[in-house]
Amino acid sequence: MPRLALYALAVCVLATAAAVVSFVEGSWLGIVWILLVGVSSNMAWYYVRKQRDEQRDDAVSG
């Protein structure tokens, strides 16, 4: 798994925890954390797919 995908996945997990804590404390700031979860999970999937496509292209051309 690419390093940037791992970083994005770590941000996703931490933002999820922050959202849960925010909502438990009654703060609406958790909505911002949920949005960050969405962005970071999309980034993780992007980098995983990018690496998989590059490996597939190398296998076909090489």
Image (spheres, grey):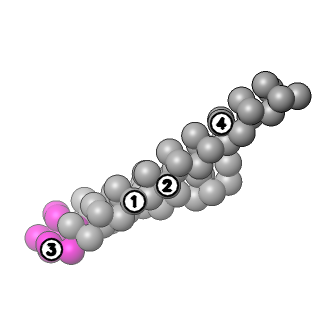
Q: In the visual, does 51 lie left or right of 13?
A: right
Badges 3 and 2: C-beta atoms under 8 Å apart? no
Q: Which amino acid does label 2 sit on?
A: Met
Q: Which amino acid does label 1 sit on?
A: Val
Residue that badge 1 annotates: 39
Mark before the other along the chain sequence, 4 or 2: 2
Badges 2 and 1: C-beta atoms under 8 Å apart? yes
Residue that badge 2 annotates: 43
Q: Distance between the residues labelled 4 and 1?
A: 21 Å
Mark before the other along the chain sequence, 4 or 3: 3
Q: In the image, what residue occupies the spot 71% across and 29% down?
A: 56
Query: What is the residue that sits farthest to the front in this orientation?
Result: 61
Secondary element under disc 3, as helix, strand or loop, is loop
Mark before the other along the chain sequence, 3 or 2: 3
Q: Distance between the residues labelled 4 and 3?
A: 41 Å
Does residue 47 appear in the picture of this structure? yes
Mark before the other along the chain sequence, 3 or 1: 3
Within 10 Å of disc 3 (Cα), the crowding (few <14, some 14-19, many 20+) is: few
Residue that badge 3 annotates: 27
Q: Position of residue 22 (x, y in %)?
A: 22, 69
Looking at the rendering, the stretch of residues picked out in magenta corresponds to 22-30
